[in-house]
Image: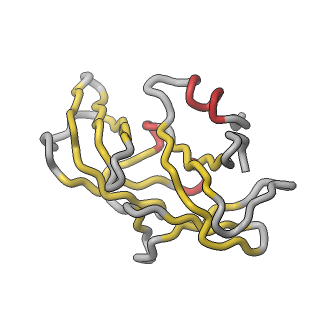
Amino acid sequence: MRCLVTGVAGFIGSPRMNFLNMQVAAVEARQMQLKHAGLSSATSSATISLPLREGAQVRTGDAVTLGLRPEHIELGNAAPIGLTVRAEYLENLGSSSQIHAKTSDGATLTVQVPGRVSAQRGDVLQVSAQPQRAYVFNADGRAL
């Protein structure tokens, strides 16, 4: 089940969903291109392409929020949605680790990965996620 509002999406799960402020760069054929200062992709573009839900209303230039669950983000740049982050602190939890990081615009991002992580505070890391795992919300907090 996909969450339809940011309030529910941010409340469900621990750690909570990450929210990143984005801007719609283009809309075409039920797809939207999003941009963010720290965004990179497998195609080296500073935009990512995500599908629009049936009936969603969005225009080029609109402010949107990208939601990514910590367990759906991986280390490295293998997935199409990529971000460069700086590690703030790490928690090794036995079977998994959480990396608490900041994006280039100061947004907080939590990444949860299996096993132990060798990164340290201040390390610059590449993280990525699959588009089908992403949530996009409009300025009113409703899913697009």
Look at 78% across and 54% down and name the residue there.
53
Asked if residue 15 lies left or right of residue 31, the reply is left
For this orientation, the residue located farthest to the right is 55
Asked if residue 110 lies left or right of residue 6, the reply is left
Q: How are the colours assigned in the image? A: secondary structure
Look at 40% across and 76% down and name the residue there.
44
Look at 75% across and 60% down and name the residue there.
58
Please state the horizontal and vertical placement of residue 64, each as a whole percent of the image. 61, 53
Asked if residue 138 lies left or right of residue 80, the reply is right
Please state the horizontal and vertical placement of residue 139, each as a whole percent of the image. 66, 47
Please state the horizontal and vertical placement of residue 28, each as a whole percent of the image. 74, 74
Can residue 125 be spotted in the picture? yes
Please state the horizontal and vertical placement of residue 90, each as a whole percent of the image. 21, 33
Look at 53% across and 56% down and name the residue there.
22
The residue nearer to you, when weighing 79 against 40, is 40
Q: Quadrant of the N terminus?
A: top right
- Which of the 4 image quadrants contains residue 67? top right
Can residue 79 be spotted in the picture? no
The residue nearer to you, when weighing 48 against 104, is 104
Task: Count the labels in the image.
Answer: 0
The residue nearer to you, when weighing 69 against 61, is 61
In the rendered image of this protein, does residue 98 appear above or below residue 41? above
In the rendered image of this protein, does residue 115 appear above or below residue 37? above
- Which of the 4 image quadrants contains residue 40? bottom left
